[in-house]
Amino acid sequence: MRPVRVDPEEEAGKCVWCGFCEFVCPTYLAVRERAYGPRGRLRIILTAVDGDLTPTAFRAIETCLVCGACDEVCPVGINISSAIRAAKARIAAHI
Ligand code: SF4
Ligand code: SF4
């Protein structure tokens, strides 16, 4: 799927926190920690103040594979992987 240019906070703000996306996410399935799944990453995007990330939150965003599996199952149609890709790019621009 081609990447879509999105506003990460706007996409994260659409989440209804149902968790459907977690069970297709390879990184969530590997570690079973919410921060390492799509829902947790969207939560981090929403709660990061001025891009200020804890080391754990930073690692959670960085370890996303941007595989797009989560996009396919989200009932709200959130561009999750594009939001995370944009968050990664923003982090990269500030380090
Ligand atoms: S794009 Fe990232 S969050 Fe979504 S399923 Fe793939 S690894 Fe998980
Ligand atoms: S499937 Fe969509 S609405 Fe549900 S938790 Fe994941 S991102 Fe949020």
Image (cartoon, rainbow, N blue to C red):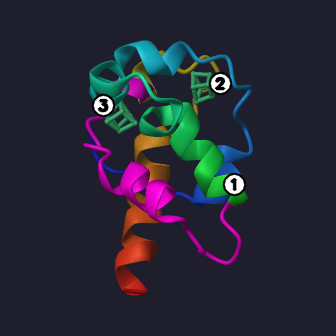
Q: Quadrant of residue 53?
A: bottom right
Q: In terms of secondary structure, where does tag 3 sit?
A: helix
Query: Label 1 to label 2, Cα distance in Å?
Result: 17 Å
Under circle 2, the secondary element is loop
Of mark 1 and mark 2, the one earlier in the sequence is: 1
Please, which residue is most extreme toward the bottom here?
94
Instruction: Based on the picture, tell me whether residue 38 belongs to the magenta stretch.
Output: no
Q: Determine if the C-beta at disc 2 is less than 8 A from ligand 2.
A: yes
**Can you identify the residue that label 3 sits on?**
27
Q: Residue at label 1?
A: 46
Counting from the top left corner in percent of width and height, residue 28 is at 37, 26
Identified at 46% across, 29% down, the residue is 33
Few, some or many C-alpha atoms within 10 Å of disc 2 (few <14, some 14-19, many ≥20)?
A: few
| C-alpha span from label 1 to label 3 | 20 Å
The magenta stretch is: 48-70
From mark 3 to mark 2, how far is it between C-alphas?
Answer: 21 Å
54 or 25, which lies in front? 54
Does the Cβ of the disc 3 residue fall within 8 Å of ligand 1? yes
